[in-house]
Every structure is written in structure tokens, then in C-alpha cells.
Amino acid sequence: MRRLTTFTCSGETLGASLDPADGAVGVLMVTGGSQTRTGSHRIYERLAKTLSERGYPMFRFDRRGVGDSSGDDPGFRGSGPDIAAALAAFRAEQPQLRAIAGFGLCDGATALALDAKPFERLILVNPWLVEADPGAPPPAAVREHYRTQLASREGWKRLLTGDLSYGKLVGGVLRAARATRTRLARQVAIALKSSGTPVHLILARRDGTAIAAAEQWRSKRFARVYSDPQFIESDSHTFARAGDADALLAAVLRVLPPPR
């Protein structure tokens, strides 16, 4: 039965939820942005419940300054101590664990990737690898948008009738073409290569963050850690569309080892 717990990190008290199970393979869930451990439309809560019923102990937490946790939010780049403290608390709660997989969404996935060594494997969902300008989509998402426009009959109709601006299209493509790969992607690639931890990507095919991540993942810098991503046919970053939750569960189960 699920229960609430707390643990400490750098003098602060962090709120957490444990979905216990008898399995020896557990999953530590790391949220993205300022999301609490429940997640948008309860995505983490529901996934944790279902996986625990299948034998996987599940641990979720609010990092410092978020949700039920005290302190100042360190952001994903500063959340390494939070993840380490959560791992220790998880192992204390479920001492039978012989392996823990890290599951992260958006910049929660990035935080895991930057310090992957303690984990048996990583499941990175729509990872944040390209730091776009505030309010702007990642360049890869812009390119994909215009590529889709030009590949469709409706897109050409809009262009020929003036509903789609030729100048805007060309300008958008040129701006996206000039965009360079980010320092964050390089840092993640170096960290993953150094850790040697197996990595599995799950991507919403039409989500802007996932489109950007897929482009980076195919680049040479990730060659030594590359594995084929799993794609879910959705445009929802948090898998809010009908059928998304079941598709996400199936994708996660494909890459988790048996719980016992």
C-alpha cells in the first residue's frame, strides 16, 4: 500500500511517496520543471501504482523547494544531491533492492543523465537537451514544423493562397538552420559516456522537446551510448492524450528487467 514519507537533503526535509513491492528491481522517478511528484494529470502517481502492482517498488519525491519539500529550488542542474538522498531513502525503505532504474521526464531526465552512475539503467522521457530561448520552440521543432508544412497538400495550398507567409517560412527555416547544438547536449553526452549506464529514450513523436532530443540523440556525440528510441504517437509532452498513459506504460515495461 502506498505511503507518504520524508527524508533529508542538505538540511531540508523532502516529501516523498513510496509504492512498495517485493521485487528486487525498483524505479526512482524524477520529475521535470517544478512539477510535484504527482505530476501533470497524475502521470507519475498512476504509473507508479501500476508498476508497483507488477512487482516494481516505486519511489517519487519533491526536490527542494517544490511541493511538500522545504528549501530553495536548485533547478535540475543542482538537483544531484536531492537524487542521491532520494536513492539512499529508497534503499532504506526497500532493502531487498539489488538494482534501481532512474525514470525522468523533461529536465528530470536531464538531471538523471548528468549523474547516471548510481543507476542500473536510465529511462529518459522527452529529455530536455536543447535550451531554447524563453517562450520559443527548439530549433529542431521549428524545422520539423516547416518540413511537415511543405510535405503536405494542405501546407502548399496555404502557401499558394497566402494563408502561409513565404517570407515567414523562409525566415523560420533559415533561423533554425543557423541554430547550433547546445552545451547542455554535450554535457549530457559526456556524462552518459562516462557512466556506462544503459540508456533508453521514450519520445512523444510530435512534442517539440522530444523532436529536439531525437535530433541530438542521432548526432555523433551520442554514438557511443545510442539505442533506438521508442516513439509514442502523441503531441503531448506529459502524455495527456487518450491512450498515451497505456502506451507509456508499455514502453517502460519493454526496457525494465523482470522485477525479481
Image (cartoon, rainbow, N blue to C red):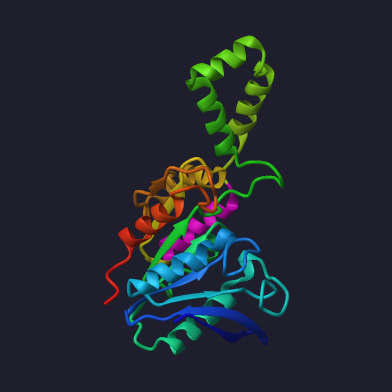
Q: Is residue 113 visible?
A: no
Is residue 190 shown in magenta?
yes
Read off the magenta span. Answer: 182-194
Classify the position of the N terminus by image quarter: bottom left
Q: List x then y, in percent, for residue 152.
A: 49, 20
Q: List x then y, in percent, for residue 36.
A: 62, 68
Above or below residue 239? Residue 69 is below
Q: Which of 237 and 143 is in front in this view?
A: 237
Q: Residue at x 49, y 16 (%)?
A: 153
Q: List x then y, in percent, for residue 216.
A: 48, 46
Report the number of discs. 0
Q: Nearer the viewer, residue 62 or 197?
A: 62
- Principal SS element in the magenta part? helix
Q: Is residue 239 visible?
A: yes
In this rendering, position of residue 112 left or right of residue 223: right
* Residue, far top: 160
Is residue 61 shown in magenta?
no
In the rendered image, which quarter is residue 24 located in? bottom left
Classify the position of the C terminus by image quarter: bottom left
In the rendered image, which quarter is residue 166 located in? top right
In this rendering, position of residue 167 left or right of residue 22: right
Q: List x then y, in percent, for residue 82.
A: 58, 77
Q: Residue at x 58, y 85 (%)?
A: 6
In this rendering, position of residue 226 left or right of residue 133: left
